[in-house]
Image: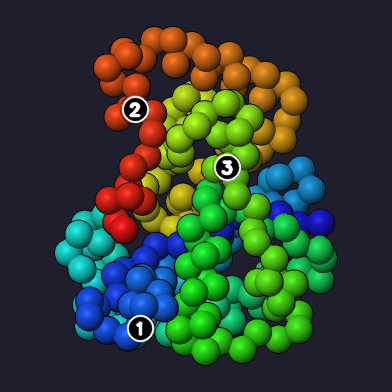
Amino acid sequence: MKHIVVDLEMNNVKKNTEAKRISRMETIEIGAVMLDDNLQEIASFRTYVKPEYNDAIEKKISNLTGITDDMVANAPKFNEALKMFTNWCLGTGDDVTIYAWSDTDYNQIKGEMILKKYEASEDEKTLLDNKWSDFQKEFDSNLGFERQVSLKKALEMAGIDFKGRAHDALDDARNTAELLNIFRDEEKFSTTLKKIKEAMESTPIGCTLGELFDFSLVACS
């Protein structure tokens, strides 16, 4: 069994277009890490993706992700990029479980497949027809949170320094994988629970929502 943690970065589809009714955003980067049975990284994947329904990376997206027009100018379009990703996943010759920090990434892929008329092979359907594991939901559920916790905040609460740049697809995937490793280790998980309890107890009441919860998805809608 191989475990794959994936993350996407996205750009807005132009307003007032038919395409936006199908998918509000387009993938502009796919990043992923492959883990062995012990949840140790054995391979990584990254590709930028050229948007087809916006002439440019919007400024706020570029500031957030660091992705510029030049970086996607010669990148593969979505259908080719997704094929590269699924070939990489299937190339292990082993069963694969895919995780993402939230179900947003899976929903994005499915919507964009419809928009861009992507035809999945029978082998690809094993990766794309079944929802990916929503690790954010698992994290929140295990710790009794009713609202979504951002990846960066989840790492802070677990006493882990975020490595790399936030909203870099590969860095986000790697950091999610590190958190996944802790949650699959009973001893590490017990220690993490203690750290999170201490973090919550030390958070001022007036700052709880702003500090602990991620409203970025709402802001982007």
- Are there few (<14), some (14-19), or many (20+) residues within 10 Å of tag 3? some
What secondary structure is found at the residue carrying circle 2?
A: helix
Spot occupied by residue 11 in the image (x, y as percentages of width and height): 31, 69
Spot occupied by residue 125 in the image (x, y as percentages of width and height): 71, 77
* Amino acid on which the number 2 mark rests in the picture: Leu
Spot occupied by residue 167 in the image (x, y as percentages of width and height): 37, 53
Question: Looking at the rendered structure, which numbered label has been put on residue 19?
Answer: 1
What secondary structure is found at the residue carrying circle 1?
A: helix
197 to 40, vertically: above or below: above
Quadrant for residue 153, please give it: top left
* Amino acid on which the number 3 mark rests in the picture: Lys
Q: N-terminal of the two: label 2 or label 1? A: 1
Q: Can residue 154 be seen here? A: yes
Color theme of the render: rainbow
- Residue tagged 2: 209
Q: Residue at x 31, y 13 (%)?
A: 204
- Are there few (<14), some (14-19), or many (20+) residues within 10 Å of tag 2? some
The CA span between labels 2 and 3 is 17 Å
- Residue tagged 3: 137
Residue 57 left/right relative to 193: left
Residue 8 left/right relative to 121: left
Q: N-terminal of the two: label 1 or label 3? A: 1
